[in-house]
Amino acid sequence: MQKFDALIIGSGIGGLECAYILAKRGMRVCVVEKNPALGGCLQSFKRGEDEFDTGFHYVGALGKGEILERLFSYFGLMELPWHQLDREGFDEVFLKDKSYLLSNGHTAFAERLSSYFPDRSNEIKRYSAFLKEVGAKITDPVLKEGNGLSSVNELFSRNAYNFLRESVGEGTALDVISGTSLKLELNRPTLPLYTFAQINNSFVQSAWRLRGRGSMITDTLAKSIEKMGGVIMKGWQAVEIKEDGGVCSFVEVCRLNTNERLFADYIISDLTPQTTLKLLKESGSVRKIFRRRINNLEQTYGFFTLNLRLKKERVPYVNRNRYYYTPELNSVWDVKDESAKGRVCGLLITQQVPNEGEKFATYMDILTPMSYAEVEKWGDSCVGHRGEEYKEFKERKAEECLRLAERIIPHLRESVERCYTSTPLTYRDYIGAPEGTAYGIRKDCNSIEKTLLAPKSPLKNLFFTGQNLNLHGILGTSLTSLLTCSQILGRESVVRFLK
């Protein structure tokens, strides 16, 4: 039997940041991770001599004084080799075979877009000012009293697509503004304006890659936690959270044939809410209506991913991300529905930063949205044992993605030395994401009371954290870790450095 002040289940960035915050306050913490590698979506993986990221590609708001820079300074992550993308064009959107660059800084962002759409200049400037205004409220869920979300509930309740249509009008301008949003799920009926605006605003502020792998973030956090006396148990799976009188009494963990009980005053789950409730096998405090609500929540789509090792000096490094949409696509807001039909119509193309002084890329990732329904027939299989049909399916998808990517990167196929593929099934099996979801629970502006989750659970000492609560992505999850820990330490003691 081991006893801790706080036990964190899952080692995604949210779980590790919670452990860091609590350890820094002098608490004895333990992180339990079922996999041999830490990091969730930030973990990297090797294929022979090649190493790729699972879900990390770039971050926003990391410039001096910006919100992620303030957070990462607190977490000791600003010493990592961060590399800023081209401020004159950090993202490039291809629509109807025409290119549009997006610039950093709200003024430059508006001016660049206005140069493409001079007749919408006033509307674009107002939109840019709106992004800046919403960005200024990003700490409200942490800093404000109550559940922390009341001050932004109006923005959660507004529909993002309707707002954009009313603000800048339908057509190409709206699509360019929305075109970098494969980093969230564009779903016309449900996407909250707050989600769209906060995520896009952070990248308008500044955009960055790591010169290296995303696992550097979680490895750095883990070393800091251990240095502060924390314990990290890799390869141990939580199998049950035991309740006694409305309180978590212990968590049973298993490794190979060894079971152990871990006791803690506080339990934080970085797993999905659905998975967390499965661990509460016998609980008189979790009502059936709450379980049904959580289990019925819809998941955002997943991705089909190509991880490419490129031949030497064949593909120049481009210091921006590229979003390509097929000319046949009516609107970028149709990608979700079209991908649900099995069609590849939108790509995110990103490259790893090369070594200092090198002009050519060694690694490239190509992502396209994919519905779980496309791979559900292999849902009962495990990695490496899905059969020949599944392999052929992935080869066809890879070929289609390469064919489209070559429209903006000529001769890409012949420049590929090795190609590795993954589907939502891969993400499901490796990081425990239900249906291989990329962005967690689908937030619904029409039903925020059901889809927007608080850190508190029905048990007094059990709390949620991670991308399913407020905003997804590194920035959203980092802010949520503060929101979760404020339930334990008190709001003022956690957020003092943000003021």
Image (cartoon, grey):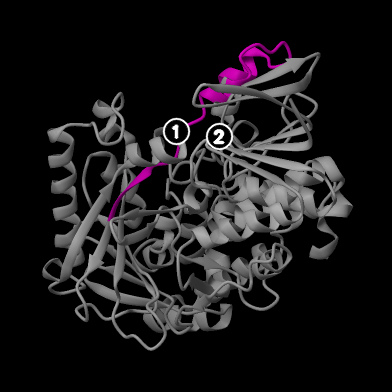
At x 82%, y 51%, the residue is 144
Image coordinates of residue 257 in percent, x first then y, are: 51, 21
Could you tell me how far apart the alpha carbons at marks 1 and 2 are, in whole angstroms?
8 Å
| Magenta highlight range | 279-306
Q: Crowdedness of circle 2 by 10 Å Cα count: few (<14), some, many (20+)?
A: many
User: On the rendered image, what quadrant is the C terminus found in?
Assistant: bottom right
Disc 1 + disc 2, Cβ < 8 Å: yes
Q: Nearer the N terminus, badge 1 or badge 2? A: 2
Image coordinates of residue 295 in percent, x first then y, are: 53, 23
- Front residue of 342/32: it is 32
Left or right of 38 in this view: 156: right
Rendered image quadrant of residue 339: top left
Q: Which structural element holds mark 2?
A: loop
Rendered image quadrant of residue 412: bottom left
Q: Which structural element holds mark 1?
A: helix
Q: Is residue 483 above or below residue 277?
A: below
Instruction: Check disc 2 and give the amino acid type.
Output: Thr
Q: Can residue 146 be spotted in the picture?
A: no
Location of mark 2 (residue): 272
Q: Can residue 496 be spotted in the picture?
A: yes
Instruction: Check disc 1 and give the amino acid type.
Output: Pro
